[in-house]
Amino acid sequence: MEDNDILKSIVDSLIKERESERRYRFVRRIIIFSVFVLIFLLVAFSSSSSISYSNDHIAIININGQISANGPVNTESIIPHVREAINNSACLGIILKINSPGGSATQSKVIFDEINKFKKVNDKKIYAVIEDVGASGGYYIAASGEMIFANSSSIVGSIGVRLDSFNVSSLMEKIGIESQIISSGEDKTILDPFNKLSEKHKSHLETLLDSIHNQFISDIKISRENKINGKDVFTGLFWTGAEAVKNGLIDEIASIYDVNEKYFNSAELITYNKKDSFIRDLMNSMIKIPLENSVHGIRY
């Protein structure tokens, strides 16, 4: 009798455990399904909002974050929105709202060049407003605007180029690890962290960075015309917005609202890439995976 009671107790326990697992799987599926429904509704709501792109307005293009081919700021996330604003007859002008410390040299240069192409074929004013940071590649993009504005406490400048690399050969030697990289071409492993950088390779890299830096400087000088003053403007240093007015990196201390009031007669402001950024941020917060942890290669 006691054996039967024990057996029944074990069976009941197993049944309850299975039921608990089924309930857990069911709840998990409901939660996942609810999240996707929420995303769908948010997208649908954003698409059907009361914002009208057919009324006269000023287009705001958010340039927010690290500049990188796979990051939040790149040619594909910026240029289509600028083109959309340019082609919209109801758009009276464009404000580039910038908060970026820089990043990819190539992406920054391409965005700068593409915006300048738009300026040559239409008469819509394109202004850049730096909020917290407009440094390196962020400033490069800002320089595509006909005028640059910033807050007095904004960080502006850092016109320079960098290439990050590490030499861990001493550490590897201490712990007994040897590199076994096989390559064709004597210079293919120029940035191999297991080998010291030779004078030949260092000289080559310095020449390469100088070339990119000189292109950066040339574009800024052309964009800013005769406004730049000061010998250390192109050394990689950065300044507050108040100081940037004095050395010619920006034109005025102003917010997007000041610019809108002064130059666009307080027109309606419409952010063209707000929905894309919102959905991307939502997805990031759910899966907890950043768009990009770091930027490799040559960067501003």
Image (cartoon, helix red, strand yellow):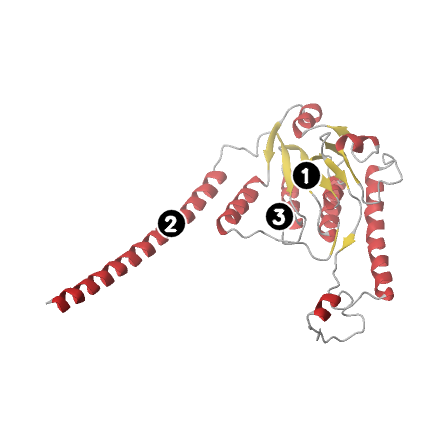
125 lies above or below 138: above
The amino acid type of the residue labelled 2 equals Ile
Tell me which residue sits at (75%, 38%) in the image: 156
- x, y percentage for residue 227? 85, 34
- Left or right of 76, for residue 199: right
Q: CA distance from mark 1 to mark 2?
A: 36 Å
Marked residue nearer the N-terminal end (2 or 3)? 2
Instruction: Examine the image and state in which quarter residue 256 appears.
Output: top right
The amino acid type of the residue labelled 3 equals Pro
- x, y percentage for residue 143? 77, 40
Residue identified by numbered label 1: 98
Please name whichever residue, 71 or 230, is drawn nearer the observer in this view of the structure: 230
Marked residue nearer the N-terminal end (1 or 3)? 3
* SS under mark 2: helix
Residue 233: give its label.
none
Residue identified by numbered label 2: 31
Tell me which residue sits at (46%, 41%) in the image: 42
The amino acid type of the residue labelled 1 equals Ile
Q: Residue furthest left?
A: 1
- Left or right of 247, for residue 44: left
Residue identified by numbered label 3: 72
